[in-house]
Amino acid sequence: MDKLLINGGPALEGEVRASGAKNAALPILAATLLADGPVTLTNVPRLCDVNTTMRLLGSMGAHLSRGEDGRISVEPRTLTSFVAPYKLVKTMRASILVLGPLVARYGQADVSLPGGCAIGARPVNLHIDGLRAMGAEISVDGGYIRARAQRLKGTRLVMELVSVTGTENLMMAATLAEGETLIENAAHEPEVVDLANFLNAMGAHITGAGTDQIRIQGVERLDGAEYRVMPDRIETGTFLVGAAMTGGHIRVNETRPDCLDAVLQKLCEAGASISTGPDWIELDMHGRRPRAVDIHTAPYPAFPTDMQAQFCALNAIAKGVGVVAETIFENRFMHVPELQRMGADIRVEGNLAICHGVAGLTAAPVMATDLRASAGLVLAGLVASGETLIDRIYHLDRGYETMEEKLLTLGARIQRIVGNGATPML
Ligand code: EPZ
């Protein structure tokens, strides 16, 4: 099991490029199942979750190939199976995203229930209820969602909760349904918009993506298409927080400043100077220690839950007290005990983490528990005195493309210890 060894201290300086967005690439790859033609995707990040999705589509009979430049070609017309097996789904719950496309295109799907994960129970009732409302017969037994349908019928869907992949699954299903579907209380996330843009590039008729009302006119078929995946706003935000924590000065290129308003606002509150261009964001902390900020996670465009752990790390070494409220997931503070091992003064009370900033953290062996928690631990390691060893970084590899290489170019002292490599004494 790989580990990361970080010798904290240097301020992050320089430029880095944002990779393609994991949370856009995954639904877009699932959406290729809807196409009646070959699809070429570019700017797809090299991530474990992307590899898992490619394996899943391949296991169903689709033909996929990956080029050197982040390009993935998909031939979905060779599909022979409509089953998403437990052995794959258990490693990546976003596999649920094949459910809508399979039912819409082939009238059948047997998808393993994704089950919970470290950050919460993460039910999929909204996905199932929405497909039932569109006419699918769905039973749940033996740990599988078994869906059958003639042609789905468009209808008005009012989402009880704002759900990103719930919105995505139902939007994909509606593209081939008979008639019009209206999704109310839809998720506004930029990745939902990116998926809608890809579906429209294939010939879908979707309007309103990015608002809480998405309207989809069903069509008979969708063509293949070429599409470039949007940049990753959470990866971008993670590097910006690293620069703010280390008192550095960085520029993130090939990114989308317009998708990070809530995060940039909090970084300014923390004392950073921020400038932006059409596809870049520059942060200068002028060697200063950040001020603590209060965070309240909520659906887009409010502050993203996927940036919560990173700001707990920032508040851990900031001046003052920052209160972090996590309103989306019920167990998303597992980075806190690990930060406490490094000397952080953070108290969790229900869905609040009260962070009293300390002047500095000290290195310690810590363990990653989920994707964004591991990002928070990396950031803490960048400022901790001494060598921090982070275990179970396969969590990190799910959502960050070559993170240690990018941090090295920014001046961090970081190295990956592969497998059972010798672990240096701390
Ligand atoms: C997406 O997960 C993202 N994953 C998550 O990113 C992100 O944290 C989350 O949205 C919130 O922004 C992908 O896009 C692949 P939800 P998703 O459905 O769609 C409840 C990362 O780190 N809910 O928006 O699974 C749910 O329990 C990952 O990249 C139901 O109750 O999240 C949660 O409390 C982590 N029933 C809330 O809604 C349902 O059927 C929002 O979840 C669906 C969701």
Image (cartoon, grey):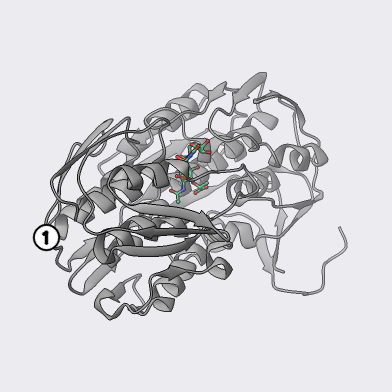
Q: Residues within 10 Å of mark 1 (few under 14, many from 20)?
A: few
Q: Can you tell which quarter of the image residue 336 is in? A: top right
- In the image shown, does 180 or 302 lie closer to the viewer? 180
Secondary structure type for disc 1: loop
Left or right of 162 on screen, residue 223: left
Whole-percent x and y of residue 273?
44, 29
Residue 419, visible in the rendered structure: yes
Task: Tell me residue 94's x, y (percent).
Answer: 47, 55
Q: Is residue 342 left or right of residue 163?
A: right
Residue 250 vertical placement versus 84 (above, below): above
Q: Between residue 121 and residue 317, name the one nearer to us.
A: 121
Q: Position of residue 50 (x, y in %)?
A: 45, 65
Q: Which residue is mark 1?
A: 220
At horizontal 58% and vertical 46% (from top left) the residue drawn is: 372
Marks counted in the figure total 1
Q: Where, quadrant-wise, is the N terminus in this rendering? A: bottom right
Give the amino acid at mark 1: Glu
> Is any atom of residue 256 visible in this view?
no
Name which residue lies at 47% across and 70% down.
51
Q: State the residue at coordinates (34%, 48%).
A: 131
Task: Work out which quarter of the rendered image holds the C terminus and state it.
Answer: bottom right
Residue at 46% x, 60% y: name it: 95
Residue 391: percent from the left, percent from the top?
74, 59
